[in-house]
Amino acid sequence: MEPILKAQRITKQFPGVLALDNVDLELIPGEVHALVGENGAGKSTLIKIMAGQYQPTSGTLIMYGQPVHFDNPIQSQAAGISVINQEFNLIPQLSIAENIFLGREPRRITGLIDWKTINQRSADVLRELGLNVSPKLRVEYLSVGDLQLVEVAKALSQDFRVMIMDEPTAALSSAEVERLFEIIEKLRKRGAAVLYVSHRLSEVFRIADRVSVLRDGQHVGTHPIEELTENKIITLMLGRELAAYTVEKGAAVEAEPALSVRNLSVPGSIQDISLDLHYGEVLGIAGLIGSGRSELMRTLFGLLTPSSGEIYIDGREVNIRNPMQALQKGLFFLPEDRKLEGIFPDLSVLDNLLLKRPRPEENFLSRLFIARSAERQRYEEIRDALSVRAHSAAQLISTLSGGNQQKALLGRALVSQARIMLLNEPSRGVDVGTKVEIHGLIRRMAQEHHAVIVSSSDVPELVKISDRCLVLSAGHIAGLLHGAQISEDNILACAVAHTTLEVS
């Protein structure tokens, strides 16, 4: 059957990075085509080229046998390609209906926006998705799962022949996932071509007709789903056979834990999570998108409220319901997104670095002259220890490179006097040299008798720095790896194949 959309020898070169290298892909009417690969394999880059967000360095997109070129997403949409993005592209201050039809609002003969039609059509597509909310409700009041469904509604409301779904179930409950699969089946029967991108192989085997695998920017194969197994897909993704492994089921330790979690649950995010963290240890937290990694870390720091479970620090049960309480209990938190949640761009490097430092109770004049001088001295100590490259203490942190911003945020940990470190994606977006420095800092924290949790999507990073590694999948614990068991193969196997492997 003639494909609706064909990617032919697509190459995308960024400065210093070959993201895609002569990739071919065909999307056929009435077919669900799964696209899989490790993080950084090139999946998102290929999607963005089809969506008009990127233009290929070389190669051709072909629709209905004719070459096409998209300079922007509007042209891609006009050609009949609809995309459900992995990251939300919603405006919180607008209503659901306004977000669904943003930029393509139906209008009356007078030229005015036809709000009645917008609200009615939005209500229809929301009803199809099983989302029982008013289309006039502002997006800022929605849960993460509902936000994901609004992204799906945006895509479904368009006139499309190709539907691209990038991790569409990452924030959905099991019931919502089932509803989405019903929608996908309807699209298949209507003759649409569906490109489904997911790390969850159980979903791939349930809905896909064919599977294409990318590895390091190259297309390593396309196979009918009946020819594949989970282990074969993982082998194609890794480029080597999946090694045999065993999973530790919670070996007892003698030392009193610094932090203990028992049966911690947050609706729609994590379920019955239990763990122990010891002083002098780096505990890695691994898991793919939607695994609950981020939610676990945010719950420990009081940013999310658990529905059940207990948290203990030094053997005593604590009630952490907000970040201030977490700080008072000796927890430090490094957020995933340094630009949105970490740095204060209009403050200096010094003020960003020392933001969480406990300040002595002093009068105004003492603080003005003595304390500020001490702060500068402490800043210089941390700057030199972490090799933060800044022209002066007064330089705005927003003018530093990403790596130096990240080191400044990690410097907060050293001056916070916290004993328990919760580090999210500590080396995200930094160069190789800076990553080595950050890994050394994390190990030094452990050697100085801190208790450290590192949550990371960078599996080699976890292999390198973790003493133990907890693997999450779909909000549950999929495995606990110790010492030599901590390998890329074992982590990936736990993360994506937990439904068929006996782990706990």
Image (spheres, grey):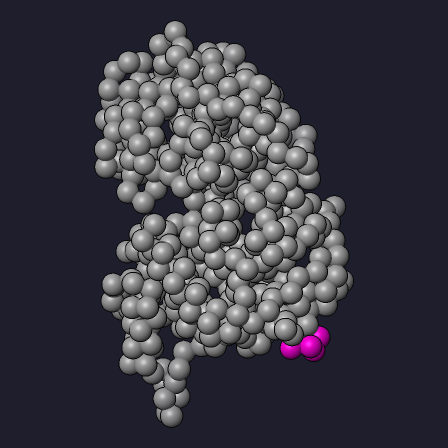
Query: What residue is rendered at 31% in x and 27% in y?
Result: 326
Q: In the image shown, does 228 or 469 lie closer to the viewer?
A: 228
Q: What's drawn in magenta, residue-wise?
A: 63-67
- What residue is at 36 percent from the left and 56 percent from the top? 178
Residue 445, position in %: x, y?
50, 17
| Residue 194 sits above or below residue 445 on the image | below
Relative height, residue 275 to residue 232 (above, below):
above
Q: Where is residue 249 in the image (x, y as percent from the top left)?
A: 42, 21
Residue, x 62% and y 34% (percent of image)? 242
For the N terminus, give its image quadrant. Answer: bottom right
In this view of the protein, which residue sits in the foreground, 377 or 155?
155
Image position of 310 (left or right of 394): left
Q: In which quarter of the image is residue 71?
A: bottom right
- Give the left or right position of residue 224, taking residue 333 as reference: right
Question: Residue 206, percent across and down?
Answer: 46, 53
Magenta stretch, overall SS: strand
Q: Nearer the viewer, residue 358 or 106?
A: 106
Which residue is farthest front?
226
Q: Can residue 240 be seen in this view?
A: yes
Q: What residue appears at the point 34 percent right and 30 percent down from the top-left corner? A: 273
Quarter of the C terminus within the rendering: top left
- The vertical placement of 486 against 395, above or below, is above
Q: Per the image, is 452 magenta?
A: no
